Image (tube, rainbow, N blue to C red):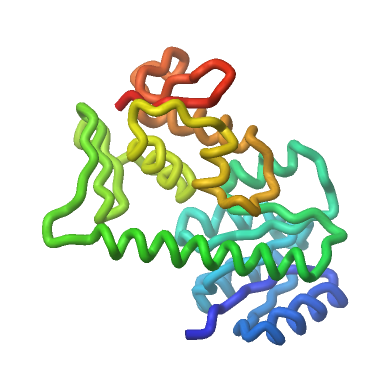
Amino acid sequence: MVDKVLVVEDEPSLLETLEYNLSRQGYQVSTASDGVSAVEMARRERPDVILLDVMLPKMDGFEVCRTLRQEMNVPILMLTARDDEIDKVVGLEVGADDYLTKPFSMRELLARVKALLRRVRLIHEEMAATAAPSSEKLVFGDLVLDLTRGEVRRADTPVALKPKEYELLVFLARNRGMALSRDLILERVWGWDFAGGTRTVDVHVRWLREKIETNPAQPTRIVTVRGIGYRFEG
């Protein structure tokens, strides 16, 4: 099955270059040059990965990412001409999976695309391997992780998690009681080739605490291990 890639870029020469190189790698490529068209194209084509420029006409890349993340779990690699840390944080907050700053080498971009697709396949394989007639669940008091259905409930109420929040929570829960370094968490959840730093882990832990802790300011489920990282207590 051919992987489908949606490229969203308003610079014609770069858009053409990306389409050409991705097509040569065997991907089925769709393109859009503004934010509104990108959302429509993603809904219609259901791509396997999206390359999304930040600076777009009609709707910027952050808004496109935020909109699509509410509807689908497709991996999104954001492209930007800026290298500000705040841009990366905003991109992660709206649901981007990875971040690449222009100018970039085509080899690096292709490697990132391949890594994102590989990570999605591994997740699907793990979900298929754990699927069984009876649902596999991790239960910690009123917090329940239904791994077969990919759902989290707290006090029998669904908890809305972004894809990376869910992956992070599952990884922490599977290693309950262990002190896990930020570097290890980053490698296992985001992949060894992720370009972001360990602050990404801190940001996602903060979001998780807001959703699963009784008092996020004094967490009892995901506790900080000074000088190391985090430990899941359940």
| Image position, residue 10 (x, y; %) | 80, 69
Relative side of 2 to 194, left or right: left
Determine the residue positioned at 39% across, 16% down.
215
Q: How many marks on residues?
A: 0
| Image position, residue 185 (x, y; %) | 52, 39
Furthest-top residue in view?
218
Furthest-left residue in view?
134
| Image position, residue 60 (x, y; %) | 71, 55
Relative side of 97 to 54, left or right: left
Determine the residue positioned at 21% across, 35% down.
139
Relative side of 55 to 41, left or right: right
Determine the residue positioned at 30% across, 27% down.
234
Q: Quadrant of residue 75?
A: bottom right
**Residue 15 to residue 158: above or below:** below
| Image position, residue 25 (x, y; %) | 67, 83
Q: Quadrant of residue 199?
A: top right
**Depth order, front residue of 163/116:** 116
**Depth order, front residue of 46/121:** 121
**Depth order, front residue of 59/120:** 120
Determine the residue positioned at 45% across, 67% down.
121
Q: Quadrant of residue 214?
A: top left
